[in-house]
């Protein structure tokens, strides 16, 4: 069970990309006091948790209703993950609309913490490693992201803006590799059938 949790944790960690999101959080939360920033972080964590856990729990039912096979989802999810990774590698400047008081929900909670990459990776982790290990890994990753966000000033000072961007590039490269693996597994499932 511990091995499955770890195996599910790693791709979800890469998909969440909390370190790469730190500069965005810093720019969106400029001018907020400590209490407001903590409220935004909590809001983002709750949004991401509800969305990811809900998708994990009902995603297969939706697939069954639509006639989607796991191989279909692996190929489509892999293609989307690959595109997201390439876009972030090629165009690192993420333009976001000016935040309102609920930017913890959108864009921080979703799509930044729990976006297409996390949802796709989570659904595929359920089929590979099981429901409970995936749920534990998703919750652990979102809690870890919240912890990183809470200490964002310290982390940005340690990493520097360039270091955070470099970590994000490495994460996106790993995400692209995971995407290729998903497409390969999806195609292999069709050949096996």
Image: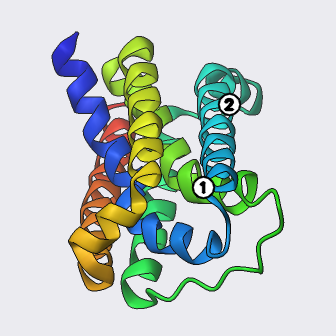
Relative to 55, is 184 above or below? Answer: below
- Residue 151 in the image, given as x and y percentages of width and height: 39, 53
Q: Is residue 36 above or below residue 95?
A: above
List x then y, in percent, for residue 78.
Answer: 43, 56
Give the foreground label among 2 and 1: 1
Residue 79 appearing in the image: yes
* Left or right for 144, reference 149: left
Q: How busy is the neighbourhood of tag 2: few (under 14 within 10 Å), some, or many (20 plus)?
A: some
Q: Is residue 153 above or below residue 118?
A: below
Left or right side of 112 for 161? left
Quarter of the N terminus within the rendering? top left
Q: Quadrant of residue 155?
A: bottom left
Residue at 40% over, 24% down = 134
Instruction: Classify mark 1: helix, strand or loop.
Output: helix
Q: Which residue is drawn at the image coordinates 40% and 71% (left, top)?
A: 85
Q: Position of residue 63 (x, y in %)?
A: 67, 30
Q: Nearer the viewer, residue 174 or 61?
A: 174
Q: Which quarter of the figure is the C terminus placed in?
A: top left
Residue at the spot of label 2: 50
**Marked residue nearer the N-terminal end (2 or 1):** 1
Q: Which residue is mark 1?
A: 34
Q: Where in the figure is residue 138, as x and y percent of width and height? A: 44, 31
Relative to 97, 170 lies left or right: left
């Amino acid at each position: 069970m511990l091995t499955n949790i770890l195996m599910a944790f790693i791709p979800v960690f890469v998909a969440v990309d909390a370190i790469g999101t730190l500069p965005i959080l810093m720019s969106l939360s400029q001018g907020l006091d400590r209490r407001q920033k903590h409220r935004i972080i909590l809001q983002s964590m709750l949004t991401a948790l509800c969305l990811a856990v809900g998708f994990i729990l009902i995603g297969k039912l939706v697939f069954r209703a639509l006639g989607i096979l796991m191989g279909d989802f692996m190929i489509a999810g892999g293609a989307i993950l690959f595109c997201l990774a390439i876009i972030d590698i090629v165009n690192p400047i993420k333009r976001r609309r000016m935040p309102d008081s609920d930017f913890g929900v959108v864009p921080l909670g979703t799509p930044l913490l729990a976006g297409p990459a996390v949802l796709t990776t989570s659904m595929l982790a359920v089929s590979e490693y099981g429901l409970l290990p995936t749920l534990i890994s998703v919750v652990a990753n979102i809690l870890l992201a919240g912890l990183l966000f809470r200490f964002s000033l310290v982390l940005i000072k340690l990493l520097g803006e360039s270091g955070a961007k470099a970590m994000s590039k490495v994460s996106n490269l790993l995400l692209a590799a995971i995407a290729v693996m998903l497409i390969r597994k999806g195609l292999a499932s069709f050949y096996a059938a």
